[in-house]
Amino acid sequence: MIRRICPNLNPDSISVDFELAIHNAIRTIFPESHIRGCFFHLFSNLKKHLSSLNLLTHYNTNPEFALNSRMIVSLAFVPQNDLLEALNMLENYLPLELEPILAYFTNTYIGRIRNNGTRAPPTFVPSSWNVYERTINNQDKTNNFCEAFHKKVQLQLGVAHPTIWKFLDELKKVVKLCDAQYEQFVAGHHAARKRRKYEEADERILNIVNRYDPETVIEYLRVISLGPPQKIKTQKDKTQKVKTQEIK
């Protein structure tokens, strides 16, 4: 349908959730477009798997278990060329209780090791969920902007299941508002800034990612997974000294 409506449409990238049918459709219709999965939904999928294994309560009540769990999804902040080495290091670091979670993540997003030693293709390729380059280039890591638009449409409709006619009428109003905002941007008006707490979170993550070192990937994953800025103690490998570093 999209091809019929816009035959010349060829987007550089498309931001979507982790739904296999959607990814397959995009690869078929827009084979040259880069699929960008949402990091928020990547993390949500991990928590859903924790819930399916009855580990969500443990996650919510055990800070160290929660931190180790987040280190798995924080592999998204490792450069793709270093991903397999980082995965091997994480496998050796994590406690046994997280083996099922790491196995799920590996099978779904990286690819399991076959009996012949080769790696099977994952459900979602790393290029669709890795956010290292997006972070360095100050690009969106989530599709929250799209979720916000959906919420705006829902608020405009006022009901969960409108008739097709009401939906079209209200959608026209939303589109008209978006067109007016676009004209303001073209005229030189600035878009609304992110909330300060989100700006600070982005700055913190960028600061960490800019200091990425493949020799200390475990410490890197722990710091990424910690959350708000704080003083932390990081353990280097056995040949290095323990030191305290300030994450700003």
Image: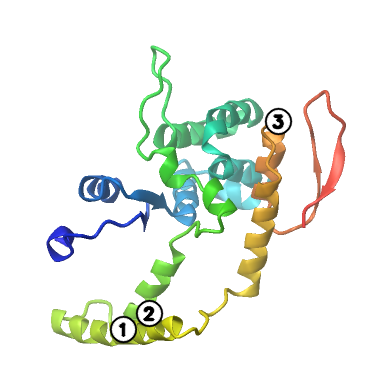
Whether residue 227 is visible: no
Q: Which residue type carries mark 3? A: Glu
Secondary structure type for disc 3: helix
The C terminus lies in which quarter of the figure?
bottom right
Secondary structure of the residue carrying numbered label 1:
helix
Counting labels gives 3
Which residue bears the numbered disc 3?
215
Residue projecting furthest to the top = 116
Q: Which residue is mark 1?
A: 174
The image quarter containing residue 239 is top right
Out of 30 and 151, give the one closest to the viewer.
30
Q: What separation in Å lies between label 3 and label 1 (alpha carbons)?
A: 50 Å
Within 10 Å of the Cα at label 1, are there few (<14), some (14-19), or many (20+) other Cα atoms? Answer: some
The spot of residue 62 in percent (x, y) is 66, 47
Residue 152: assigned label: 2
For mark 2, does the 10 Å Cα neighbourhood hold few (<14), some (14 to 19), or many (20 or more) residues? few
